[in-house]
Structures are given as C-alpha cells and as structure tokens.
C-alpha cells in the first residue's frame, strides 16, 4: 500500500504518468504532478489541474506544479516545494519523455536536443534533486524508490535502425537505472525500470504518424505493474 507516501511524478498530467498517479491515489498517496501543461493543449488532453482533480477524486492528495524538467533550478524548486508541502518524498517516477520516431536524416536537431534534454537530462536532474529526500525516507524506513519508464538495454541493431536518436535517448534513462541502482543501494533506495512488451494507447500516439492507438493496451496496465514494483522491499 502507498497510503500517506509521497510520489513525485514527471509528466503526470496524462497517459501513463496519470494512470500511475491515480492507482497510487486509490491507496491514499500524495502526488506531486510535475508537468509542463498548465493550460489545455490543442492536441493532447489534460493539464496539471485536471490531473489534480482526478487524483483528489480517487482518494489521494495532489500538488500540481508546472515544471520543465530540463531546467535544473525549476526542478529543484518543485522538489523542495513538494517535500515541504507533504513532509518529504518517498518515490520518484521518471515518466516524462519526448519521442520522435525518425531516421537520422529525418531527425531535426531541435528534436534530437529535446529528446536528450527531457529523457536523459530530465531523468538525471530529477533523480539528483530528489536524492536527499529519498535518503531521508530510507532513514525513516519508508522503502523509497526511483522508477524510470525506460526499456531494457539491448545492442541488437533492430532497436536502433529506424530511430537511432530516440533509442539512444531512452537508453540513457535505462543507464541511469543501472548506475543509480548500484550507487544508491547503500542508502536503501531501490531503482528500477518499467517498460511494456506492447504499445500503450496514450494520447501521445495520436501525434506519431506510424503509431496506431487502437492496437495498444490501456495505460492502467502500466499503473498496476508500477504499483507492484513500488510495494516491493
């Protein structure tokens, strides 16, 4: 159970991040929503405010915060505000991610920088900022975790061939898992990755030309899996 635990979730205004938040809210958790969408997006549903309303309705407590996780000062301020508001941080979910499924010639450098800025830098920045509070959580025996939404590392060419920039960026998140799991082990902080075997039908698929949202599983399946991981010792 995640009752009274505090989760700092990036990209929690919609999709998998929101699904994880709502599953935790049903346990009575505190959720910090760290996302960019403060006002309605023309193509994507949900804002930090609509997510907060859903979390509260599900039984949790919500703190909506507009945050660009590429900005280390903004992240530090949001993490501090979360810890002060809820009395600490027990779990970090690095869910926010940028995607552009294209070959090398078709990948604008603006998109390349966005993917590495959000996926790799953002994950590292959030993990670094939350670490002091996760250490405190461990000292209180609250079983702290970091969970990254990132794939298993595989050097098979087929995972790189069609979208090398995106794969590298997501693998950066996975390498954070491997390194931080070992680095943070002495502190009693668990670090894991979660990745689906199938497509997940999120609103983001609607803006990816090669994706078919109708063929995906619902985000709730990821939320259920995350819930199991976060309740393990």
Image: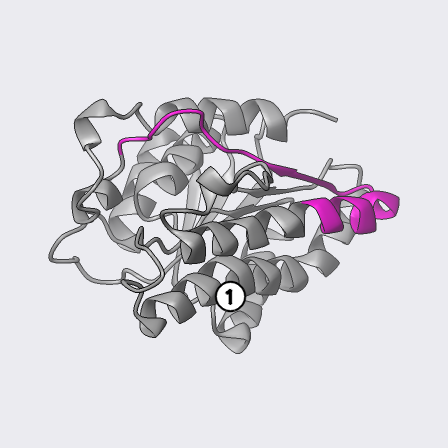
Quick check: can you spot residue 149?
Answer: no
Residue 80 point in image, percent of width and height? 59, 66
Q: Residue at left 76%, top 43%?
A: 189
Which residue carries the number 1 mark? Answer: 78
Residue 214 point in image, percent of width and height? 18, 26
Q: Residue at left 71%, top 57%?
A: 131
Q: Is residue 92 above or below residue 231?
A: below
How many numbered marks appear?
A: 1
- Front residue of this view, candidates 63 and 104: 104
Judged from this view, the residue extending furthest toward the bottom is 73
Q: Is residue 221 above or below residue 33?
A: above
Residue 159 point in image, percent of width and height? 46, 41
Residues in magenta, as a range: 178-201
Q: Residue at left 58%, top 60%?
A: 126
* Quarter of the image that includes the C terminus: top right
Q: Residue at left 33%, top 62%?
A: 36
Q: Is residue 224 above or below residue 95?
A: above
Residue 52 in the figure: left or right of residue 1? left
**Quadrant of the rendered structure where residue 109 is?**
bottom left
Residue 212 in the figure: left or right of residue 161? left
Q: Secondary structure at mark 1?
A: helix
């Amino acid at each position: 159970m995640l009752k009274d635990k505090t989760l700092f979730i990036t990209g929690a205004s919609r999709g998998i991040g929101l699904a994880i938040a709502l599953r935790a809210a049903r346990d009575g958790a505190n959720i910090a929503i760290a996302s960019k969408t403060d006002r309605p997006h023309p193509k994507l549903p949900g804002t930090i405010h609509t997510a907060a309303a859903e979390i509260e309705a599900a039984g949790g407590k919500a703190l909506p915060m507009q945050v660009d996780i590429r900005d280390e000062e903004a992240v530090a301020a949001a993490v501090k505000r979360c810890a002060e508001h809820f009395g600490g941080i027990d779990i970090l979910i690095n869910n926010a991610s940028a995607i552009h499924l294209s070959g090398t010639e078709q990948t604008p450098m603006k998109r390349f920088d966005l993917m590495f800025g959000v996926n790799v830098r953002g994950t590292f920045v959030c993990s670094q900022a939350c670490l002091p509070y996760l250490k405190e959580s461990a000292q209180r025996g609250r079983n702290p975790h970091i969970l990254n939404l990132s794939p298993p590392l595989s050097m098979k060419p087929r995972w790189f061939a069609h979208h090398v920039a995106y794969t590298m960026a997501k693998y950066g998140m996975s390498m954070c898992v491997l390194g931080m799991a070992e680095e943070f082990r002495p502190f009693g902080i668990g670090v894991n990755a979660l990745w689906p075997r199938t497509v997940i039908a999120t609103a983001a698929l609607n803006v990816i030309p090669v994706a078919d949202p109708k063929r995906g599983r619902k985000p709730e399946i990821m939320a259920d899996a995350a819930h199991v991981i976060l309740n393990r010792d």
